[in-house]
Amino acid sequence: MITVTINGKKYEAEPGVCLGMLAAEKAGAALICGGHGKCGKCRGVVAGGVSEPTDRERAILTDGELRRGVRLLCRVYAYGDCTVTTGGVPDGQIRTDGELPAHEHAPAFSSLGAAVDVGTTTIAARLYRKDGTQATEKSSLNPQRSYGGDVVTRMEAALAGHAAALAAAVRGAVCELLCDMAAQAGADVRQIDGVVITGNTVMLHFLTLTDTEPLTHAPFAVRRLFGETVSAASIGLDALLPDAPVYLPSCVSAFVGADTVTAVAASEMIDNDGVFLLTDIGTNGETVLKYGGEVYACSTAAGPAFEGAGISMGMGGTTGAIDRVRLLPDGALGVHVIGDVPPTGICGSGLVDALSALCEAGAIDETGFMEDDPVTVEEPVVITQNDVRAAQLAKSAIHAGIRTLLHTAGIGCDSVDALYIAGGFGSYLDVKNAGRIGLIPSELVPRVRVLGNAALTGASLLLLSLPLRQKYEEAARKIKLVELASNPVFAAEYMERMMF
């Protein structure tokens, strides 16, 4: 056995262990690309008996970094005692504000109830008393990020034999949040006798240890669409009493999940007269349109650019991330950094702002071409030509999805009463800049309504109102899925919206 010291803590390991996998398991390090050496984000300072730098590391890291001992941990194997220093694991930051819409109070619990949103990046939860008042709330990063930053990479890990570990990771994180919230409320966690857990279809498959293999290839069949109540023991929530009921809301399809359904519940869009759009600007880019008596939905597979993955210095909205950028009168860029510390990367809202500012300054032309590559946002954070191209692919997918749903219903942007933007990212988005770069139709900017974590708010409603639970089970079954893969309207819109 050898001794590997990670951030000051000693661990025993077998010779030949991959430091990236060990740091992910023991210290929560993120392997955004699943440990394939593609993203370059698992940097750490390494010393001791380890393998020599690979060609991939030499291509990504500078000579100065290599001299200082900086390595890509997923490419390093330990054969003797060694030390690893990572950049630390940031706490999750997610906005969960917003009052609950009016509802019939008929809670699905007797003592304490919890609503949980298992997001790909962040897990957020709220604890409620029987009278419907909120006791506390808490969030954390999803520890599954150790197996990849997006659901596709994680499903690859599941196929490689890590399905049980992925389930254990998310179950443990949910239990920890429930225990922490109960402690904050001065209660025993076993008093929580009703839980609602929402999330995208893949996250709920991981949680319930349901095989995700059918979701990895066409026709993307699903084993379960949920809309069911299970016991805490059956899904490994060992902090609760074994028979504590856990409700998993209905999904629509493989890529339109329960989180979209609960976000629709939070928006009240199907109850109100008018034409409403809802979009979650994330990896799947789920968009919903309510027009007349019909509800349409699509998933645009936008990719994780606006969640920090696929961007050279991209990161989540955590300490050190540039989250605001503006063009100053002298032509320089002004930035805001989360935590008021020196920047280490740029998150989604900062990327949108930066692209808008660079377009305004003429540093990016309408085709996305950068004459100077890279462009410094704030030392040492830069945006490269490849970053711009990745953002173009993502923003055109979101925009084209919106336009395609409107075309399906036979209406235009002028008919839309409101565009709801859901998700933690949307809470920090400058919607004018989003319209400026074509992430959303510019005509809809004045009609944008930001919902914050709508999935969690909707889960809270289904916890506190049993009639709403039944209502949205039925609503999910009636949502019309609009397939985009072979849709000529989407293909045309996608190409057109690539421009800035």
Image (tube, grey):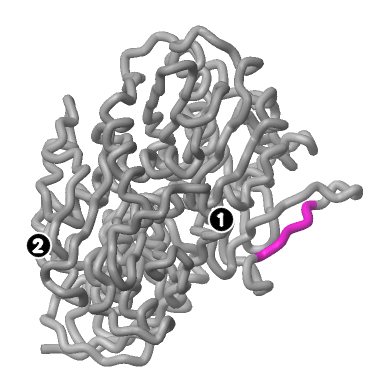
Determine the residue positioned at 9% across, 57% down: 161
Q: What element carries label 1?
A: loop
Residue at the disc numbered 1: 99
First along the sequence among labels 1 and 2: 1
Determine the residue positioned at 30% across, 24% down: 478
Residue at the disc numbered 2: 234
Is 211 situated above or below 182?
above
Is 302 situated above or below 137?
above
Q: What stretch is highlighted in magenta?
A: 333-337
- The quadrant the C terminus occupies is top right
Magenta part, dominant SS: strand
Question: Hey, what amino acid is under mark 1?
Answer: Glu
Is 437 situated above or below 228?
above
Distance from disc 1 to disc 2, alpha carbons, whole Å, reads 32 Å
Q: Which quadrant would residue 282 be assigned to in this image?
A: top left
Question: Hey, what amino acid is under mark 2?
Answer: Ser
Q: Nearer the viewer, mark 1 or mark 2?
A: 1
Check residue 336 in the rendering and tell me which mark sits there, or answer none.
none
Residue furthest to the right: 329
Q: What element carries label 2?
A: helix
Camera-side residue: 17 or 243? 243
Camera-side residue: 226 or 84? 226
Tell me residue 423's x, y (percent). Answer: 49, 48
Please check the rendered image and state whether residue 28 is part of the magenta-colored stretch, yes or no: no
386 left or right of 115?
Answer: right
Determine the residue positioned at 24% across, 84% down: 49
